């Protein structure tokens, strides 16, 4: 059986399920820490496991540039190289080329670009992206698509979406089916309901093991993101996994789960961990703030991570002020643990039919902290 998703419960449009992959079962809703270049920054693989994370994300764009897709293949694939025995999802490269590469040229057949690392020339086509993700041995492979910036005209969104749908068909053709492995299609269409519906029709016509909502978390803001989800997720096949790419803050995750999303990934918890921003049950805190200099209390009393069980806010404050690398290490670990605990709480609430109560309780905790 290829990779598949089973549902255990629904509560409104929120879903609790299990993603069955070649490298194990993943409870959903799931948050995937981002391991862009084959590492979740500042964390060993054991530390990532200790947070409760079950699935991580890697990037075709970064890994094809360095150390190179064929080299990762020779090293036994990403699982072997990273020492991660759980499932791995890899993004296809389209989004990263548009946001990172220099001198890129998109044509109907693919995209040519220069590496942001050393300026060397590269080309990504649907077939090459699928081949790279096969060499990486990703459990979930993403289609090569074109993610347009926000705002965009309906004409621009239609052009990019229709090209992405042609590329999706070519990705389906190029993908080598394997037990426990799957290819996900990516819905595009900007903020335009008819284009989103056309994109879902095109993808379900081709048939994928899971469906991602792309083209969001590109600066449109939470309200427009949620409005777009409201008109898109109900159209997705209920018996397949629904993945919202690049999202998001804890508040985004609650709203995304409420709207039928099963899978998330975002650099927010790791990026924030390196910049002293802590996500806690009482909201966000900047640990560089002088108010923490003598604060001998626990960062988050509800958390069981090393930062919260062994250290104080004053110590974290000191580490960041002193530019010590242990600061980003401890706070990244905490933030990923916070995101995992959030997903665990939401999943348990859906199974118990009290999703809205739990969401309200979590949001009340943030408000209390802000008071
Ligand atoms: N293939 C593909 N990949 C995507 C990745 C994405 N990632 C995002 N957003 C990430 C946004 C994001 C970027 C940086 C930070 C750090 C704090 O500023 C947080 C969020 N949107 C995305 C859309 C797509 C998409 O359509 N197709
Ligand atoms: Zn913690």
Image (cartoon, rainbow, N blue to C red):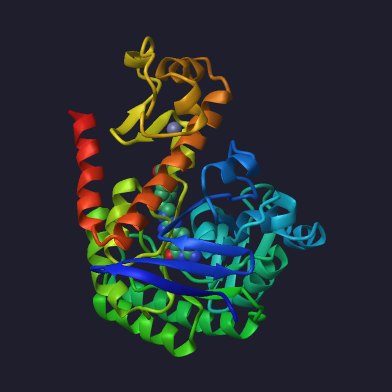
Residue 90 placement (x, y as % from top left):
58, 62
Which image quadrant is residue 62 in? bottom right
Which image quadrant is residue 242 in? bottom left
Which residue in the rendered view is the most extreme toward the front?
Answer: 352
Drawn side of residue 142 relative to residue 295, left or right: right
Residue 185 placement (x, y as % from top left):
48, 76
Q: Is residue 336 above or below residue 175?
A: above
Residue 132 placement (x, y as % from top left):
68, 67
Q: Residue at x 48, y 20 (%)?
A: 311
Drawn side of residue 5 relative to residue 228, left or right: right
Which image quadrant shows ligand 1? bottom left
Which residue in the rendered view is the most extreme toward the bottom?
Answer: 205
Front in this rendered view, residue 177 or 110? 177
Residue 185 shows in the view: no
Q: Residue at x 69, y 48 (%)?
A: 118
Which residue in the rendered view is the most extreme toward the left?
Answer: 371
Q: Residue at x 51, y 47 (%)?
A: 52
Q: Is residue 146 above or below residue 173?
A: above
Front in this rendered view, residue 2 or 39? 2
Residue 330 placement (x, y as % from top left):
52, 29
Which residue in the rendered view is the most extreme toward the right?
Answer: 74
Q: Residue at x 60, y 60 (%)?
A: 88
Quadrant showing the C terminus: top left
Q: Is residue 12 above or below residue 2?
A: above
Drawn side of residue 214 relative to residue 67, left or right: left
Which image quadrant is residue 65 in? bottom right
Residue 229 shows in the view: yes
Quadrant showing the N terminus: bottom right
Please tell me how many numbered marks the rendered image carries: 0
């Amino acid at each position: 059986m290829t990779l598949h998703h089973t549902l255990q419960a629904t509560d409104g449009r929120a879903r609790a399920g299990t993603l069955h992959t070649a490298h194990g079962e993943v409870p959903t809703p799931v948050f995937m820490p981002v391991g862009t270049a084959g590492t979740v920054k500042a964390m060993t693989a054991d530390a990532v496991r200790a947070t409760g994370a079950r699935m991580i994300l890697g990037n075709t764009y970064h890994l094809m540039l360095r150390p190179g897709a064929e080299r990762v293949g020779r090293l036994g694939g990403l699982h072997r190289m990273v020492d991660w025995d759980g499932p791995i999802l890899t993004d296809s490269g389209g989004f990263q080329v548009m946001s990172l590469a220099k001198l890129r040229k998109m044509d109907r057949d693919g995209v040519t670009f220069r590496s942001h690392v050393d300026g060397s020339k590269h080309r990504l086509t649907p077939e090459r992206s699928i081949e790279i993700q096969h060499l990486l041995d990703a459990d979930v492979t993403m289609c090569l698509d074109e993610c347009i910036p926000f705002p965009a005209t309906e004409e621009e969104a239609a052009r990019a979406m229709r090209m992405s749908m042609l590329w999706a068909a070519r990705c389906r053709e190029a993908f080598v089916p394997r037990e426990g492995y799957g290819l996900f299609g990516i819905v595009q269409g900007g903020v335009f309901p008819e284009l989103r519906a056309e994109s879902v029709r095109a993808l379900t016509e081709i048939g994928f093991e899971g469906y991602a909502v792309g083209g969001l978390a590109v600066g449109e803001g939470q309200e427009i993101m949620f409005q777009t989800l409201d008109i898109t997720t109900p159209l997705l096949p209920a018996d397949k996994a629904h993945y919202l790419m690049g999202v998001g803050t804890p508040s985004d995750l609650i709203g995304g789960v409420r709207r039928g999303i099963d899978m998330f990934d975002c650099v927010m918890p790791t990026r924030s961990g390196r910049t002293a921003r802590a996500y806690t049950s009482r909201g966000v805190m900047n640990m560089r703030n002088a108010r923490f200099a003598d604060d001998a209390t626990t960062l988050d009393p509800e958390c069981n991570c090393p930062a919260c069980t062994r250290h104080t806010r004053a110590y974290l404050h000191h580490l960041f002020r002193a530019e010590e690398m242990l600061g980003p290490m401890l706070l990244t670990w905490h933030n990923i643990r916070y995101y995992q605990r959030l997903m665990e709480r939401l999943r348990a609430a859906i199974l118990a039919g009290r999703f809205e109560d739990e969401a309200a309780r979590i949001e009340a905790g943030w408000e209390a902290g802000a008071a």
